[in-house]
Amino acid sequence: VAIGNSAGKTTQGVNAVAVGVNAGNTTQGTNAVAIGDSAGKTTQGVNATAVGVNAGRTTQGGSAVAVGVNAGNNTQGVNATAVGVNAGLTTQGANAVAVGANAGNSGQLASAVAIGNGAGQNTQGASATALGVSAGGTNQGTNAVAVGINAGNNTQSGGAVAVGSGAGQTSQG
């Protein structure tokens, strides 16, 4: 199914759905769903879902989910989830989860979890966890854990744990 100018234009997979201008435009995988202008525009994986303007726009992995304006916009990994405006915007790793505006926005690595506006926003390490507004906001290391508003906000080392509002906020070793 393709509805909208240039929707599902080139190589649309079996049972794929593209609704909106340029939705699912080029190489949309089997059972993929793209709803919104330029959603799932280029190389949307099998069983992937993109809902919102520019959601899952370029290279969305198989079974990935992107919901919200610019969610999972550029290079979203297999089984990754991005929900919220600019969540998982650029380079979201496989199995990563970003929920909230700007959560996991740039450089969220594989299996990282960021929940809360601005959580894990810039460069979140593999398997790191950030829960709370701006938790693990910038340079959160591999396997680090930050829970609370601004916890582990700026440069949290790998394996570090910060729990509580402002805990380990700057340069936690």
Image (cartoon, rainbow, N blue to C red):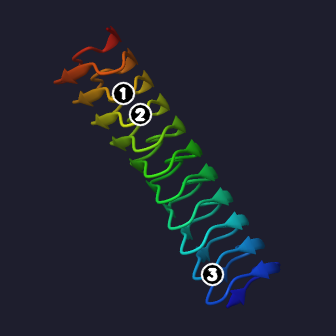
- The answer to whether 128 is drawn above or below residue 115 in the figure is above
Amino acid identity at mark 3: Thr
Q: Earlier in the sequence, mark 3 or mark 2?
A: 3
Query: Alpha carbon of mark 3 to alpha carbon of mark 1: how far?
Result: 36 Å
x and y percent of residue 79 in the render? 47, 60
Q: Nearer the viewer, mark 3 or mark 1?
A: 3
| CA neighbours of label 2 inside 10 A, class few (<14), some (14 to 19), many (20+) | many
Q: Earlier in the sequence, mark 3 or mark 1?
A: 3
x and y percent of residue 95 in the render? 43, 52
Image mark count: 3
Q: Nearer the viewer, mark 3 or mark 2?
A: 3
Amino acid identity at mark 1: Gly
Which residue is tagged 1? 136
Task: Report helix, strand or loop for mark 1.
Answer: loop
Viewer can see residue 160: yes
Query: Alpha carbon of mark 3 to alpha carbon of mark 2: how far?
Result: 31 Å
| CA neighbours of label 1 inside 10 A, class few (<14), some (14 to 19), many (20+) | many
Quadrant of the rendered structure where residue 6 is?
Answer: bottom right
x and y percent of residue 26 in the render? 79, 71
Find residue 30 and name its label.
3
Residue at the image position 75 percent from the left and 83 percent from the top: 4
Query: Alpha carbon of mark 2 to alpha carbon of mark 1: how far?
Result: 5 Å
Quadrant of the rendered structure where residue 137 is?
Answer: top left
Which residue is tagged 2? 120
Kindly indicate whether the residue at mark 1 contacts the one at mark 2 (C-beta within 8 angstroms). yes
Residue at the image position 49 percent from the left and 48 percent from the top: 87
Q: Is residue 72 left or right of residue 166?
A: right
